[in-house]
Amino acid sequence: MIGSHTISPARRSDSSARRRIVQPPARFSESRRTSSLAWSRFILDAPDHDAFPEDSAPESTRVGNAKEDRHFVTALARGLEVLACFRSGDKSLSNQDIAQRCKLPKSTVSRLTMTLTRLGYLIHLKDSGKYRLGTASLAIGSAMLARLDVRKLARPIMQELADFSHATVSLGTRDRLSMIYVENLHGSVALTLTLDVGSRIPVATSAIGRAWLAAVPEADRLAFMEEVRELDHVAWPGVRRGIEQGVDDYRTLGVACSFGDWQKDVNGIARAFEPGGGLPIMAINVGGPSFNLSKEFLLEEVRPRLIEAVTRLESTLTH
């Protein structure tokens, strides 16, 4: 049950202005920055929703103690990491690019990319010597999305929200320290962000990520927070406050919020749910540029509709 909360009367910026696409700030340089502060700014405040250092962290960080398990196949894990390092904005990557992202020797990467190319998971571009994802990789992703029934059930509900709010409405789930979008819809006259299926945004500073954190068991939330803390002790106090505020908002308002925390000119609210069928916790986010979506409008007008929409979706999924 959501507690009472006094909110000033809703006021939304005039959305009758001509349609435009809001571009995120320029991509952060992927040069090898080793300082703690540089990493934290990129990980926790990065406007680039398709590339995060935490998703290309050293292999030992990603697999933890898994390699101590005799059933863990390191070669297979490395091959999958090579495929995972391709992001939605990447057209192609060189062996050097992949080696830097996966933190693997270039010689190892060369053998992995050759094997993956022979199996059809990568395509080798002879002119540039780079690689792009192959049709075998597409088949795996397409098969997963095609069988993700929650997307089909959520679309009409999400579209209603998008049309009402003139915002971007997204469905996502956690992948490491990011939330990855599996569905993304816009209002008919929406001022939108350039986000699409496959885009990633940080868990710690986004509304959709904080909703996920509020919905998972406390042990999982604390484990995630410890992982973020270890990445950067300098930025951690501020990040922790944001996460704790997000969890508190979720308990009192029924939604998690991010008003300028992910990007200073972007506002959003989100609510999580359990899709069932063995799938992980997911969340639906309503967000967009702050000049079009004020904090008051999101909390007063959109919030009750978002809660009702997620409740309807949960009811549909259980029948």
Image (cartoon, rainbow, N blue to C red):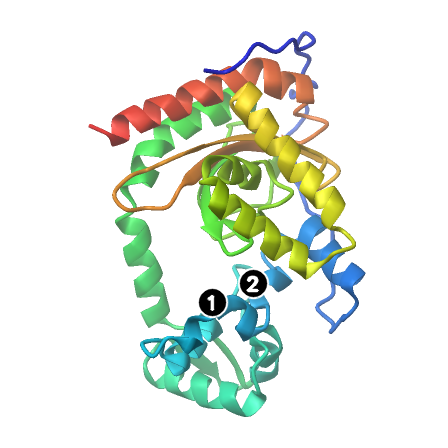
Q: Position of residue 297 (x, y in %)?
A: 63, 17
Q: Quickly name the residue at label 2.
A: 55
Circles 2, 1 touching at the beta carbon (< 8 Å): yes
**Three-letter amino acid code at the position of disc 2:** Asp
- The answer to which quarter of the image holds residue 190 is top right
Q: Quickly name the residue at label 1.
A: 84
> How many angstroms separate mark 2 from mark 1 (CA)?
8 Å
Looking at the figure, which quarter contains the N terminus? top left
Secondary structure at badge 2 equals helix
Compared to residue 65, the image places residue 5 above or below, namely above
**Residue sitting nearer the eye, 80 or 2:** 2
Compared to residue 26, the image places residue 190 above or below, namely above
Q: Position of residue 86 (x, y in %)?
A: 51, 67
Secondary structure at badge 1 equals helix
First reached walking from the N terminus: tag 2 or tag 1:
2
Q: Position of residue 206 (x, y in %)?
A: 61, 40
Q: Identify the residue at image location x=67%, y=60%.
A: 231
Mark 1 Cα-neighbour bin, 10 Å: few <14, some 14–19, many ≥20: some
**Residue sitting nearer the eye, 31 or 193:** 31
**Residue sitting nearer the eye, 24 or 61:** 61
**Three-letter amino acid code at the position of disc 1:** Ala
Mark 2 Cα-neighbour bin, 10 Å: few <14, some 14–19, many ≥20: some
Compared to residue 107, the image places residue 98 above or below, namely above
- The answer to which quarter of the image holds residue 75 is bottom left
Looking at the figure, which quarter contains the C terminus? top left
